[in-house]
Image: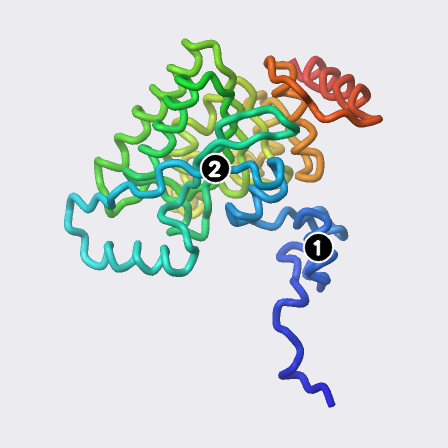
Amino acid sequence: MTTVDDIPSNLWEECPLCHQLLYTRALEKELWVCPKCGYHFRLHSAQRVQITVDEGSFIPWDNDLPLVDPLQFPGYREKVQQAREKTGLNEAVVTGRATLAGIPLGLGIMDLAFIGGSMGWIVGEKIARLMERCVADQLPVVVFCASGGARMQESLISLMQMPKTSGAVGKLGEAGLPYIGVLTDPTYGGVTASYAFLGDVIIAETGAAMGFAGPRVVEVTNLNLPRGVQTAEFQYEHGMIDILINRQQLRNTLRILLHWFGGTRPEHSENAGASSTALLGEMTDHE
């Protein structure tokens, strides 16, 4: 006889927004977007790879960079080790080479599960190396941003990753290579103030939170900011974002953009032409 203890605990997920109970396998087919209210669940880097690039095409880069602990911050090394054991990652960003619809590209994916996606030396170094290697290999770059900001345990070392990564983006531009930034929930702090908003095309997932200072910091400053200022929708309406999109349309949109930027061998589908026309119309209207 089946008891409550025999039922797996991961069969159902509660939507944080509408609180509907959702069957996990059905939610996965929806790319972790709530079918009831459209809430976009936060994804781990492995999930993002799975739904974005061609199966088996992702080759990771720079997984062996050493930890930097300039202040000998109490408990920091232990915290990083715990994050590595919990997530199976070496740091808060995964970088590498992949193909999307047969088009080769350099890929970066930040993971909030690793110390809140905070940017320290390794994150900045991996992003910079990603872009520099793509210059050498003549590859376009797509980076999925998700971060709470700079990693305070590394002090000025973490803050210096902002100009370093911004300079690496500049090298892509000088080489005539496209950079697409995808802002996911949430994107804050030094990541927002550097490579997140430097893309040739800036895309944001529906409902994503973003800004330089987080909502708790803004609250204590007593600033009278417009309602919803730290949302993707507000940023799109005010010209900071080029494309606001549902996750279920994201892969095809990236395919179209990479093809426009000069990629080869795009996937063929009955709706490819219609999608291109609709996207071009949306971007033209926005401009």
User: Which residue does the image show at 71% across and 46% down from the upper left?
Assistant: 38
- Sequence-wise, the earlier of marks 2 and 1 is 1
Disc number placed over residue 163 in the picture, else none = none
108 sits left or right of 280 in the view: left
User: Which residue does the image show at 70% across and 39% down from the upper left?
Assistant: 248
Q: Which residue is mark 1?
A: 27
Q: Is residue 98 visible?
A: yes
Question: Regarding mark 2 in the picture, which secondary structure is present there?
Answer: strand
- Between 34 and 68, the one lying in front of the other is 68
The part of the image, by quadrant, that contains residue 123 is top left
Q: Amino acid at mark 1?
A: Leu
- Marks 2/1: CA–CA distance: 27 Å
Marks 2 and 1 in Cβ contact (< 8 Å) = no
Q: Is residue 237 visible?
A: no
The part of the image, by quadrant, that contains residue 264 is top right
Residue 33 % position (x, y): 68, 48
**180 versus 155 height, above or below:** above
Q: Which residue is mark 2?
A: 59
* Mark 1 nearby-residue class (10 Å; few <14, some 14–19, many ≥20): some
Q: Amino acid at mark 2?
A: Ile
- Between 12 and 96, the one lying in front of the other is 96
Question: Regarding mark 1 in the picture, which secondary structure is present there?
Answer: helix
Residue 79 % position (x, y): 29, 58
Which quarter of the figure is the C terminus placed in? top right
208 sits left or right of 3 in the view: left
Residue 196 % position (x, y): 46, 29
